[in-house]
């Protein structure tokens, strides 16, 4: 059904390529950030939700 409508749009063939490029770039940057992040920082952040807050424990 939608195939007919997509055939009428000029330049639509660029959108799948653009979407794939955005996907690959985003997850490559995310993966690179994870690899470069200090392991001590990651461990410290993983314990953060488990620490008690003195102001809320009154």
Image (cartoon, rainbow, N blue to C red):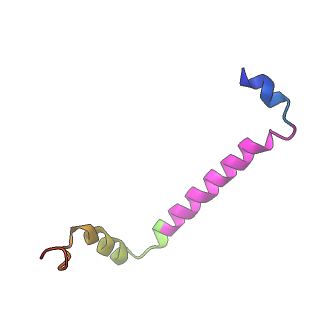
Q: Is residue 23 left or right of residue 42?
A: right
Look at the image and tell me in which quarter the N terminus lies: top right
Looking at the image, the residue that sits furthest to the top is: 1
Q: Which residues fall within the magenta stretch? A: 10-33
x 30%, y 68%: residue: 46
Q: Is residue 26 left or right of residue 48?
A: right
What x and y, as percent, mark residue 7? 83, 28
Q: Is residue 56 left or right of residue 29?
A: left
Looking at the image, the residue that sits furthest to the bottom is: 54
Query: Quick one: 55 or 33, which is closer to the camera?
Result: 55
x 41%, y 76%: residue: 38
x 80%, y 39%: residue: 13
x 33%, y 77%: residue: 40
Q: Is 2 one of the magenta-colored residues?
A: no
Q: Is 13 one of the magenta-colored residues?
A: yes
Image height of 34 relative to 54, above or below? above
Query: Quick one: 12 or 58, which is closer to the camera?
Result: 58
Q: Quadrant of residue 55?
A: bottom left
Query: Quick one: 20 or 57, which is closer to the camera?
Result: 57
């Amino acid at each position: 059904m939608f195939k007919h409508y997509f055939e009428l749009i000029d330049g639509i063939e660029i959108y799948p390529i653009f979407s794939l490029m955005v996907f690959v770039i985003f997850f490559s940057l995310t993966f690179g950030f994870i690899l470069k992040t200090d392991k001590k920082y990651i461990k410290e952040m993983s314990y953060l939700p488990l620490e008690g807050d003195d102001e809320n424990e009154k």
